Structure formats: structure tokens, C-alpha cells
């Protein structure tokens, strides 16, 4: 609990992680956040977190440096920090598409690096993050990184960095797929005569209940679906329409397309930089 954690970038995800750490009992004095935008600093400062406009000030003396900036500016931010990184500092990146090898080249030091793929439910402490560690990150560094990300939800590890493209497609983009389905269900309910408030309440409660059942029942989603699909009943009729529309194949195509786009973004933002000493 004594490790000093510096957030470079104080946007939504950094604020969510800081809030989770504080709720878990970490003292606010162990956290610092740097951001050039005053409004961002003010928001996270209201939680008791020390703030600064200077990234180098935040990094100085930190045990963990959480890089929470957009991929488009990631290289510039890290290159500017290159002279300020200290031996043994753990670098935790939550930037999509930026490889650990690119981060290492920008840092200019053989630092332990953990790359993370969180998702937006982390803003409510209900996220899941996939983590990948480079060769310099040992058990202590992995534990530190896991502790930071667990503040916003569940944590899993992948042994192959390329698997983060699949993670991005499934859990990173995944909340939007469920929101899309909820939108369609609410609209269908309204066309059947339910008012917006009731349609929304029924849909959201059903989505939540189904997720709890899938998590806690011990049965596979396929079996849970079969359990509520009575022969000749309403559910069977609805599932039949979905099958005729090849919805399962469309879901597969959508997730594959998201993974492809993740690889494209990695090539754009995560390519090895030309860094000269």
C-alpha cells in the first residue's frame, strides 16, 4: 500500500482506477495525476489525488507509472518522459494498440512493462481487464499491475501479446454489442405498445438478470438458452427467427472485424518508433 502510483493522463479511465484504489483503502497521498487540462485535474483532485500539469513531476519517485493517454499522442508523451523514467519503475499502459516493444523503445530503458486492455464498465467498478507483461516484469511487478487494474473490476492475464487483439474485439468493444441489442429490444417493445420507461426497465433488468445467471449458475450460456426454450413456445419462435437471419454468423463476423481493426490500429500506433539515443 506504500507504492507511489503516477497517472499520466487524468481522463475517465485514470479517474476510475484512482477511485477504485481509494475505495480499496489506498491512501490518496500515494497517488498523483498529471494532465494538461485543468478540468481533468480538478475532477480527480476532488478525490484527494495530488495533481500537476507536468508529466515529469508526476513520474519522479513513482513506483508505478500508468500511461493513460490516447494512442495518437502516446509516442510523443512517452518520448518526452524518456529522460525522467527511473530504473525499476513499472510502466502500465492502458493505451489500445501500442505494443510493449514500442513502449520499451520509447522509454529507452529496459523497464518492466504491463500492457492492459480494460473496458468501459471499469468506470463503475464492473470492468474486466486483460494484461500482458514483458520479459522484465516479474512476480512483484505483475502483482502491482494487477492490483491497479483490479480496482476497476476483474483481471485476466494473456501469455501472448497478439491475443490482446481478440480481447479488444470481445471485451473491449463488447459492451457496445450488448448496448446495441438492448437498443433493439427497447425499440421493439415500444413498437409493441410499451412506453419507453417500461420498455427500458424490462430490457435492462432482463440483461442484468441473464448476466448474473450466466455468471453464477455454473451452466454454459448454450445450456441456459436451451433451459428457457420450450418446444413450440415463444422463445423457440424468436430464436428461430434469429437463426434464419444468421445472427450467430454475423456476431462472428463482427468480432473478427473488430479484431482485424485492432491489428490495424496496432500497426498504426504501436509500430516500433525510430528512437535515437
Image (cartoon, rainbow, N blue to C red):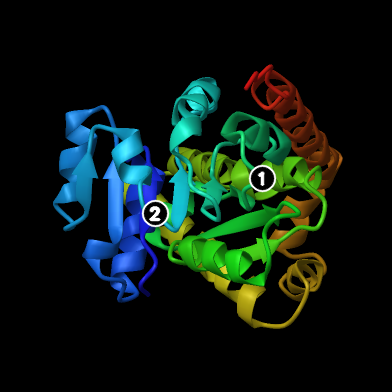
Please tell me whether residue 18 is drawn above or below residue 37 in the rendered image.
below
| Numbered disc 1: secondary structure | loop
Residue 110 is tagged as: 1
Q: Give the residue at the far front of this rendering.
A: 277
The one nearer the camera, 122 or 67, is 67
Question: Of callouts 1 and 2, which one flags the residue occurring earlier in the amino acid sequence?
Answer: 2
Above or below for 54 versus 219: above
* Quadrant that contains the C terminus: top right
Image quadrant in which you'd find residue 106: top right
- In percent of the image, x 67 and y 42: which residue is there? 168
Left or right, 31 with respect to 268, comes to left
Examine the rendering and report whether any part of residue 11 can be seen. yes
* Image location (x, y in percent) of residue 164: 73, 45
Residue at image x 62%, y 48%?
A: 111
Looking at the image, residue 240 sits to the left or right of residue 72; the answer is: right
Badge 1: residue crowd in 10 Å (few <14, some 14–19, many ≥20) = some
19 or 251, nearer to the observer? 19
Q: Pointers 1 and 2 in contact (CB under 8 A)?
A: no
**Image position, residue 110 (x, y; %):** 66, 45
Mark 2 lies on residue: 62
Q: Quadrant of the N terminus?
A: bottom left
What's the distance in space between the residues labelled 1 and 2, CA to CA? 16 Å
Q: Which mark identifies residue 15?
A: none
| Secondary structure beneath label 2 | loop
| Residue found 20% across the figure and 51% down from its top | 50
Q: How many marks?
A: 2
10 Å crowding of disc 2: few (<14), some (14-19), many (20+): many
Residue 225 on image: x %, y % = 75, 67
Q: Is residue 44 visible?
A: no
Amino acid at each position: 500500500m506504500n507504492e507511489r502510483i503516477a497517472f499520466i493522463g487524468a481522463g475517465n479511465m485514470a479517474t476510475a482506477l484512482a477511485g477504485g484504489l481509494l475505495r480499496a483503502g489506498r491512501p490518496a497521498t500515494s497517488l498523483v495525476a498529471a494532465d494538461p487540462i485543468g478540468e481533468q485535474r480538478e475532477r480527480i483532485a476532488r478525490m484527494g489525488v495530488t495533481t500537476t500539469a507536468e508529466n515529469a513531476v508526476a513520474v519522479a519517485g513513482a513506483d508505478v507509472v500508468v500511461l493513460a493517454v490516447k494512442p495518437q499522442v502516446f509516442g510523443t508523451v512517452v518520448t518526452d518522459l524518456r529522460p525522467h523514467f527511473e530504473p525499476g519503475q513499472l510502466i502500465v499502459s492502458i493505451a489500445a494498440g501500442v505494443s510493449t516493444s514500442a513502449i520499451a523503445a520509447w522509454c529507452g530503458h529496459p523497464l518492466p512493462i504491463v500492457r492492459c486492455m480494460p473496458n468501459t464498465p471499469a468506470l463503475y467498478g464492473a470492468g474486466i481487464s486483460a494484461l500482458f507483461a514483458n520479459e522484465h516484469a516479474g512476480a512483484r511487478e505483475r502483482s502491482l499491475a494487477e492490483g491497479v487494474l483490479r480496482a476497476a473490476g476483474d483481471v485476466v492475464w494473456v501469455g501472448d501479446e497478439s491475443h490482446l487483439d481478440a480481447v479488444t474485439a470481445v471485451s473491449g468493444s463488447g459492451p457496445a454489442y450488448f448496448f446495441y441489442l438492448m437498443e433493439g429490444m427497447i425499440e421493439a417493445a415500444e413498437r409493441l405498445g410499451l412506453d419507453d420507461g417500461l420498455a427500458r426497465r424490462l430490457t435492462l433488468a432482463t440483461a442484468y438478470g441473464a448476466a448474473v445467471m450466466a455468471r453464477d449458475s455454473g451452466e454454459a450460456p448454450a445450456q441456459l438458452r436451451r433451459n428457457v426454450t420450450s418446444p413450440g413456445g415463444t422463445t423457440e419462435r424468436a430464436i428461430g427467427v434469429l437463426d434464419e437471419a444468421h445472427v450467430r454468423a454475423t456476431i462472428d463476423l463482427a468480432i473478427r472485424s473488430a479484431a482485424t481493426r485492432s491489428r490495424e490500429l496496432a500497426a498504426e500506433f504501436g509500430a516500433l518508433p525510430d528512437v535515437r539515443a
